[in-house]
Amino acid sequence: MARAGLDQQIVLLAAAEIADVQGLDEVTLATLAQKLGVRTPSLYNHVSGLPGIRKQLSIYGMNRLTDTLARAAAGQTKDDAVRSLARAYLGFVREHPGLYEATHRLPDLEDEQVKAAAEGTVNVVLGVLQGYGLEGAAAIHTIRGLRSLLHGFASIEQQGGFGMPLDLDTSFRLLIDTFLAGIHSLYAKI
C-alpha cells in the first residue's frame, strides 16, 4: 500500500533535488527511498523503477527548461530575446545541474512524451528566431548552433573547465554577441 501523502509528483521532485544536489548518478531507488523515508519497494506504487524515474526526470527537466526560456524571451524580440534566452539557459544549468543533465540522457526519442517535451524547447527557440525571418532549414541550423554554444559553455563551466581568472559572464556575453553577429552576417534581411 502506498504511503499517505506520497505520490508521483513528490517522488519526482525528490529525485530532481537529489540530482541537483548530489548528481544525476546518485538518483537511485535506494537514495530516493531513503530521502522519502520509505522502503524501496514502496516506490513502485508511484514509478516504474529507475528507468521510469529517469524518463520522468528527463521530461520534467525539459519542461522546466522550456518554461524558463519562454518566460525569459517573452515580450522581447531579436537580439534582446536571444540574449535573454541564453542567460536564462545558463542560469537554469547553474541552478539545476542534475536536472539539466537528465534532459540530455534521453530515455527514448521515439517516446511520445519525451518527443513532446523536446519539441516544446525547440518551439520556444523557433519562435525567437522567427523575429529574424528564419524558417525551415536555416532556423534548424541556427537552433543547432545556438544549442551547441549554450550546452558547450554550460557543460565546460559545470566541469570546472574554465580555469583562467576572467569573468565567466563576460565570456558568455561575448560568445552570444559573436553568435548574433554571425546571424546578422549570414542573413542580410535581418
Image (cartoon, rainbow, N blue to C red):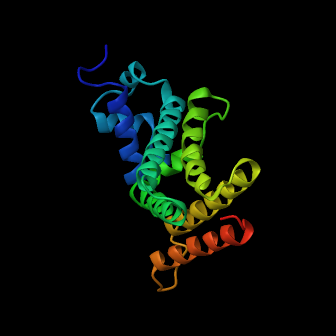
Q: Which residue occupies the extreme front position in the image?
A: 189
Q: Position of residue 139 (x, y in %)?
A: 69, 53
Q: Quadrant of residue 88?
A: bottom left
Counting labels gives 0
**Residue drawn at (27%, 33%) of the image:** 37
Q: Relative to residue 62, is residue 12 depicted above or below?
A: above
Q: Is residue 165 visible?
A: yes
**Residue drawn at (49%, 51%) of the image:** 100
Quadrant (top left, top right, bottom left, bottom right) of the C terminus: bottom right
Q: Is residue 4 or residue 117 the one in the foreground?
A: 117
**Residue drawn at (61%, 69%) of the image:** 180
In-image side of 172 versus 1 (left or right): right
Q: Is residue 104 or residue 189 the one in the foreground?
A: 189
Q: Quadrant of residue 78?
A: bottom right
Q: Position of residue 157 (x, y in %)?
A: 51, 69
Q: Position of residue 166 (x, y in %)?
A: 48, 85
Q: Is residue 23 visible?
A: no
In-image side of 98 versus 148 (left or right): left
Q: Is residue 102 or residue 29 the one in the foreground?
A: 102
Q: Which residue occupies the extreme bottom position in the image?
A: 165
Q: Position of residue 15 (x, y in %)?
A: 39, 39
Quadrant (top left, top right, bottom left, bottom right) of the N terminus: top left
Q: Which residue occupies the extreme left position in the image?
A: 4
Q: Is residue 163 or residue 145 the one in the foreground?
A: 145
